[in-house]
Image (cartoon, rainbow, N blue to C red):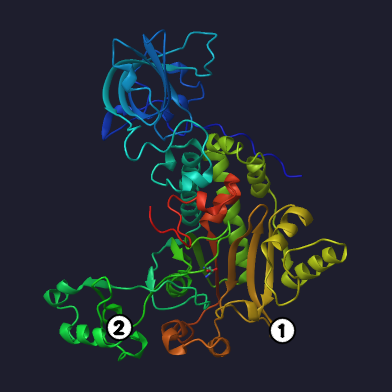
Amino acid sequence: MADKIPPPTDQLAAVPLDNAGASSSTVHKPWSPSRTRIRSILGRPDGGAGLASQKVQISGWVKKGREQGKGKFAFLEVNDGSCAANLQVKVDASVSDLSKLVTTGTSLTIDGCLKIPPQGKATKQKIELSAEKVIDVGTVDQHGKTPYPIPKTKLTLEYLRDHTNFRARTTTMAAVTRIRHKICLAAHVFCDKHDICYIHTPIITTSDCEGAGEMFQVTTLINQSEKLEKNLVKNIELTEAEETLAKVEDRSKLKPGLLLPRKDGKIDYSQDFFARQAYLTVSGQLHAETYACSMGDVYTFGPTFRAEKSHTSRHLAEFWMVEVELAFAGVEEAMNCAEALVKDICKYLLEKCLDDMELMKNVDEACIDRLQMVALTSFERVTYTKAITLLEEAVAKGKKFENQVAWRLDLASDHERYLTEVLYKKPVIIYNYPKDIKAFYMRLNDDGETVAAFDVLVPKVGELIGGSQREERMDVLMERMEEKRLPIKEYEWYIDLRRHGTVKHSGFGLGLERMLLFATGMDNIRDVIPFPRYPGRADL
Ligand SMILES: NC(=O)C[C@H](N)C(=O)O
């Protein structure tokens, strides 16, 4: 059993308690010197009690409000997004029109004095704000055409998905978002600590890294009327296009390269713009390799896109990946690095956002234990062939899987969960996959049948990371590309890296949203990214 990580000392109070101002011990931002974030009050180890009698200004949104004492005063629970906790604010009717303040969703800026609430009250708060002046109020339209969609009642995650413009006002989504921020930071801190240089790979590309063809095409549109003005499309007379369009019913019979206005009056001149069809990237890996093969260890971290029509709770059309590429490194070093990265992220979350992680226990009781376990336990490493044998043994003993288990078939999510949750009860790295089910760039092993690829599987989620040693031998790489029928001409720049100063190198990609599912215990990947993109959803 893993040792427990010692409890972090800073918890919420990741901010220094004493800032430069002699008269105040709350933290002020240089660009808004009068405003205090609620985190710097409630996040102190004393819950803010030590700040009693200090004057502060806070801004935020009302989570709950109620008038009391026959309308003589109101209690508001205000949240400003800096932490999960709400600051209780007491406002007397002499200070403001209470009826304007108590509606959930109202925004406020309030000057007041921090006070210890009377003992014996139901409130757990160690401190409350007694309002002296209400400076700004943004009221909520409750009765108009589009009433405020986030009332104080409990809302389902499905409902909130249709209100992504407001869902960060819910406690859970705000906590997930802060955890997401910390995971990103943890990845950057890890890479910086290990001298791995951050590079930016392009989002628009002509190459299909995974060779799976699941790419979104980039279409470049311009209004017909702007066409001539901007001189962007020179090779065709507009009138000719219009005439042709009127005559030809079946567009596929048109002269290739002819630029025609679409039904909405726009012209697609993509081929003209990029000289060939461009796509949204599925992975920054190939471009990251070019930098690794010049600068040593690098990483890229950005959005990637898959035009997979999958409606699962683990897939998105737009997701973020941390992709590390290590030069002069074999597959084992890449596995070591991947394991160290996951562990460091877990430790970072336990140290930097334990308050939000505590809140996530409402979603998944085990989420903190899982982070602690992963932070301290070494990952199991098992070859793909052995994993198949283990799964076959389970089947022989009566275990039912949704998907077939057989050598040369990819592992499905229920196989992955069986290995991590039932058999090993910890993360498992599966390596040496059959070459036929893996991408062209993965290094062929001596057996001629498998490639030096690996996946890191974790409990709850399954595949979190995919990586491999890259094929650095030009002849083998070209053979593999031919086998997979890839248009070699389009990858010449990639092959060049093997032609000139080729080097053993390896890398991997960690799915940010999968890491979030693992950390927070959320069930659906659509709820761990601010604006999820999936089949049927690209608005809002
Ligand atoms: N950088 C990586 O190794 C990730 C890999 N290209 C993938 O998309 O799975």
- Looking at marks 2 and 1 on the same chain, the residue that comes earlier in the sequence is marked by 2
Say above or below: 133 vs 245.
above
Q: Residue 237, can we see it?
A: no
State the residue at coordinates (33%, 31%). 140
Residue under label 1, please give it: 447
- Residue at point 47% right, 42% down? 178
What amino acid type is highlighted by mark number 1?
A: Asp
Find residue 500 and report its horizontal and vertical position in percent. 45, 85
Where residue 67 appears, as percent x and y from the top left, is 40, 15
What residue is pinned by disc 2?
A: 275
Q: What element carries label 2?
A: loop
Q: In which quarter of the image is residue 395?
A: bottom right
**Number of marks drawn:** 2
Q: Is residue 540 visible?
A: yes
Q: Which residue is at a point 77% across and 54% down the rendered structure image?
A: 422
Task: Please determine whether, in this image, residue 13 is positioned above or below residue 53.
Answer: below
Could you say which is closer to the camera, residue 176 or residue 506? Answer: 176
Is 371 on the left-hand or right-hand side of 81? right
Q: Is mark 1 within 8 Å of ligand 1?
A: no
Q: The N terminus is located in which quarter?
A: top right
- Disc 1 packing (10 Å; few <14; some 14–19; many ≥20): few
Seen from the viewer's position, the closer of residues 519 and 159 is 159
Label ID, residue 342: none
User: Identity of the amino acid at label 2?
Assistant: Ala
Residue density around tag 2, few if under 14, some if 14–19, many if 20 or more, within 10 Å = few
Quadrant position of residue 82: top left
Q: Determine contact: label 2, label 1, CB under 8 Å.
A: no
Q: Which residue lies furthest to the left in this view?
A: 229
Q: In which quarter of the image is residue 349?
A: top right
Q: Residue 538: horizontal and vertical position, in percent?
A: 40, 59
